[in-house]
Amino acid sequence: MQKSNLLDKINSLPNESGVYRYYHNNTLLYVGKAKNLKKRVRSYFSFTPSLRANPKNSPRIIKLIEEANNLEYTQTSSELDALILENSLIKQMHPKYNILLRDDKTYPYICCDLKEDYPRFEITRKVKKDSLTKYYGPYASGAKDLLEALYLCYPLRQMKSCKKRCIFYDMSRCLAPCEFNVKLEYENILKQALQALKNPKQMLKTLNEKMFKYAENENYEEAAKIRDMINHIKNLNQEIEVDLAKDVSFDVFAVVSDNEFLSSTRLVINHGKVVSVINEKIINKEGDFLSQLLFANYKEGIIPNNIYIKEENENKELLSEYLSKLANHKVSIKIAKTNEVKKLIELAENNALINLKKQENNLLFKLKSFFNLTNMPYVIEVFDNSHFQGEAIVGAMINYNLSSNEFNKQNYRRYNLTSSNDYEQMQEMLIRRINSFSELASPDLWIIDGGKALLDLANELLAQNEINVDVIAISKEKLNHLAHRAKGAARDKLYFKDKVYELKTNDEVLQFIQKLRDEAHRFAITTHQNAKRKNDLKASKLEQLGISKANIIKLLKYYENYENIYKADFDEIAKVTNKNVASKISKNIK
């Protein structure tokens, strides 16, 4: 599209709220929201002597405007709706120039249901609106150690369901409320445990005593466990000693940046004490980082009445309105004014600066720079499919978080596929994944088990849906026309855009991608085997009725799966096979 056509689009924009999107051909460059679309978009440009980027813009915005040759917009009924739509589109489509904060993780709380006769503590990621359930956190790390420390220091009800006294009673770690009436004593212990959650350091003396006792008895394994627990509680919050001497609860956010990165720190203050420090760090691009932080941090969990920031933000009132609706109570985003809150803002800023200067994951940067990826590959999804002679065709997707170096098994996905060849099976799987981006946010990188054809397929599907996700394909080395798998010795080929990479077998990038591919393959094979076992069981039911394998194959080809066969009517089954088969299925299956 020529700049003259871009000018026509700018002039046709309405004076209404909405979301605008800049493109270079079919590549989505940037998504933004506006109270007034025409005024906001025009502010990016100078119009004399010809259409060009406004020199008052930041260097990144100038580069963006120079690239843009197309503009689209979506009008909304309010500026708040525009803010929500903007956030959703950024998460799903990965615009090239937008700040992108991952919000597909939730931080755990420790909760205690006071409605129970003998309340106990558990870790949860879901917060219920229940005044008699107490929540502590959220915790960026250390929640499990804190929970174990509680049960080690206080004789609480150790097991969720227990009908008679057990070994914990014998070890003096439980009062056995399952057998004895110890309500008054238990209430006192519970109060102490609840107080310890507000200030975990008060458990350190007891934990140290237990550690030394285990060591004296030469139970070094248990002593080591408690030692690690102590260290985790100490590190749970370096500033846990901050005490406002008031029973107040609120959150504080601070944001710092340099040319490369944005860093933020959230301090969670419960009952006057800092109980959690949550850090984020992302690539520095354009957009409102604070808005994304609040969307991500309060997607689930407890939203406090007051959230403090250092300076004014153009979306402050909109975000307050959004969070108030989400929380079902008034939420105010305020500028820190009192000395005590200003000190907490300063503390948060110092934490954010430390996080900004931290040494980064070398492989994360190596992968990005080696392929010149558009996105920092924090979250990676890998696809593979499996079948045996066209039976039990399944697709598998695994999810890996490179910033924490762990497989996210809760984000693995299985797909029952119907297509007859590898290309169409991958197409079917990727389309279904794209359609689910609103449920599970899109990753930063896809890795496809296959060659150039499947790479092009993935890129084409993403382009059709205006989504900027990088794609790498890996094809197995062929020896004597057979695929060769050998850890550390396979000369697999990597494909990215129009380039083919043949790396040495000891190359870190190749070995990392192979590790992810092999996990996807393992998951696909396991999924296929489970599906085949189920299908074999269903097939045996039909075979037991005296239906031939040839007729079972006919039915599967027509109905695609056993469930559809069981639901089909008599006449239709008779047409596909014969009346005898239809009669057997109708009488015995339905």
Image (cartoon, rainbow, N blue to C red):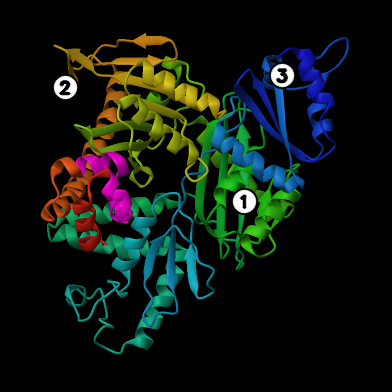
User: Which residue is drawn at the image coordinates 69% and 43% (left, top)?
Assistant: 83
> What is the quadrant of the C terminus in the image?
bottom left
State the residue in front, 528 or 132: 528
Amino acid type, mark 1 = Val
Q: Is residue 285 above or below residue 156?
A: above
Category of crowding for the residue at label 1, using alpha-carbon neighbours closer than 10 angstroms: few (below 14), some (14–19), many (at least 20): many
Give yes or no for residue 569 being in the magenta stretch: yes
Observer able to see residue 534: yes
Highlighted magenta segment, given as a residue range: 552-575
Tag of residue 252: 1
**Residue depth check, mark 1 versus mark 3: number of the one nearer the observer:** 3
Task: Name the spot of residue 174 as percent of width and height, x first.
Answer: 26, 76
Mark-to-mark CA distance, 1 and 2: 51 Å
- So how many labels did they put on this image? 3
State the residue in front, 365 or 3: 3
Q: Earlier in the sequence, mark 1 or mark 3?
A: 3
Tag of residue 486: 2
Mark-to-mark CA distance, 1 and 3: 35 Å
> What is the quadrant of the N terminus in the image?
top right
**In terms of image quadrants, where is residue 3?**
top right
Amino acid type, mark 3 = Ile
**Residue depth check, mark 1 versus mark 2: number of the one nearer the observer:** 2
In the displayed structure image, the side of residue 59 where residue 110 appears, left or right: left
State the residue in front, 69 or 189: 69
User: Which residue is drawn at the image coordinates 40% and 76% (left, top)?
Assistant: 190
